């Protein structure tokens, strides 16, 4: 049974879910999600002999959401996880991330190998720092309607996503959108991020009405600005990570994704998934779960849990 509390880390309050005893494992969620997204992993990892902690990340849920856009850089978000490990009285941890939480996990392992002894990323491959700022490269390539670009101007996406939070969460989490890259990733002029979708589809088997209600109620209270501010630091993150150009993550690593996840089926994602070893020389496994979409740890918890338990047990035994 997991418990919840608020803990101060890196100068802010983080709401955490916690269970189990043993080596520390930190679970970092993505957008637009919460620590609740790990509801199937927390008890399984605790039962396997780990001390599992999943925070609502900075800007989300019941954790603090600084007003300043610049407070959401990769240094801030990784700093939160470093601070969390220290606040828990630990000096070592293994870190797992999904979606936006994956870059946090990868960079935590990259920046602080003295703390993070193993790393697993779900859906989003490790950092291949490109030749220029991500948003500049999109523009140079003639792309003007990628969702990253739509999320840049403060207030625009917030207004759309907060107009009807229940509809937003039903479409983003429960819809088929992220299985179709062209629909999910590109914003049609005048239609907004949700314009491609209808909210009257039945929920997938893995997402109950009660689950959806929890996400909806939490985002009604918090709004979407905190999570969107992560996207508003994409170019800044590129600038900040210049010292790690072409760096490798040498800790044991694991990559998991769904075969129908638009993040890995798109042109860039597919290339990166085929080149993981360039950044992860000690990659122990690349698990592509057939038929799964983007929300892989919620969609296929048994397979994800089995892979994580095996990986974390082997890593902690080293």
Image: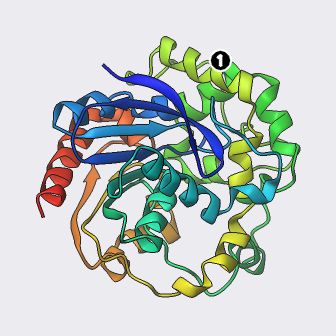
Q: Is residue 146 visible?
A: no
Query: Hey, which residue is sitting farthest top in the picture?
Result: 210
Left or right placement of residue 45 versus residue 90 in this view:
left
Q: Residue at x 72, y 22 (%)?
A: 220
Quarter of the image where the N terminus is located: top left
Query: Observer-nearest residue: 48 or 294?
Result: 48
| Residue beneath disc 1 | 217
Percent position of residue 283, x then y = 24, 70
Query: Hey, which residue is sitting farthest front in the picture?
Result: 89
**Residue 112 vertical placement versus 194 (above, below):** below
Percent position of residue 307, x then y = 20, 48
Q: Is residue 4 visible?
A: yes
Count neighbours of disc 1 (C-alpha within 10 A) and say few if under 14, some if 14 to 19, many if 20 or more: some
**Residue 4 vertical placement versus 27 (above, below):** above
Q: Residue at x 73, y 37 (%)?
A: 224
Q: Residue at x 68, y 54 (%)?
A: 230
Percent position of residue 314, x then y = 12, 57
Left or right placement of residue 193 versus residue 163 in this view:
left
Q: Residue at x 58, y 24 (%)?
A: 215
**Residue 296 vertical placement versus 298 (above, below):** below
> How many discs appear?
1
Percent position of residue 69, x then y = 80, 55
Q: Secondary structure at mark 1?
A: helix
Quarter of the image where the C terminus is located: bottom left
Report the coloring of the rendering.
rainbow
Query: Observer-nearest residue: 54 or 40?
Result: 54
Left or right placement of residue 218 versus residue 65 in this view:
left
């Amino acid at each position: 049974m997991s418990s919840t509390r608020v803990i101060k880390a890196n100068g802010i309050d983080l709401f955490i879910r916690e269970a189990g005893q043993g080596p520390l494992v930190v679970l970092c969620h993505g957008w637009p999600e919460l620590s609740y997204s790990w509801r199937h992993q927390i008890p399984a990892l605790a039962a396997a002999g780990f001390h599992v902690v999943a925070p609502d990340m900075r800007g989300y849920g019941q954790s603090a959401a600084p007003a300043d856009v610049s407070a959401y850089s990769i240094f801030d978000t990784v700093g939160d996880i470093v601070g969390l490990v220290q606040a828990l009285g630990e000096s070592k941890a293994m870190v797992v991330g999904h979606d936006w939480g994956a870059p946090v996990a990868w960079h935590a392992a990259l920046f602080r190998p003295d703390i993070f002894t193993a790393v697993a990323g779900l859906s989003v491959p490790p950092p291949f720092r490109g030749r220029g700022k991500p948003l500049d490269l999109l523009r140079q390539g003639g792309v003007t309607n990628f969702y990253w670009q739509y999320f840049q101007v403060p207030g625009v996406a917030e207004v759309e996503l907060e107009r009807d939070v229940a509809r937003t969460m039903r479409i983003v989490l429960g819809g088929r959108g992220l299985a179709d890259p062209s629909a999910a990733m590109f914003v049609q002029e005048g239609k907004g991020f949700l314009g491609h979708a209808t909210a009257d589809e039945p929920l997938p088997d893995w997402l109950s009405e009660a689950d959806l209600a929890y996400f909806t109620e939490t985002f009604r209270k918090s709004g979407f600005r905190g999570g969107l501010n992560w996207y508003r630091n994409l170019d800044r993150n590129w600038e900040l990570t210049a010292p790690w150009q072409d760096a490798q993550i040498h800790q044991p690593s694991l990559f998991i994704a769904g075969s129908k996840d638009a993040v890995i089926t798109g042109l860039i994602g597919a290339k990166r998934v085929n080149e993981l070893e360039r950044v992860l020389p000690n990659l122990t496994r690349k698990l592509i779960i057939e038929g799964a979409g983007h929300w892989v740890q919620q969609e296929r918890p048994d397979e994800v849990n089995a892979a994580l338990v095996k990986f974390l047990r082997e890593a902690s035994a080293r």
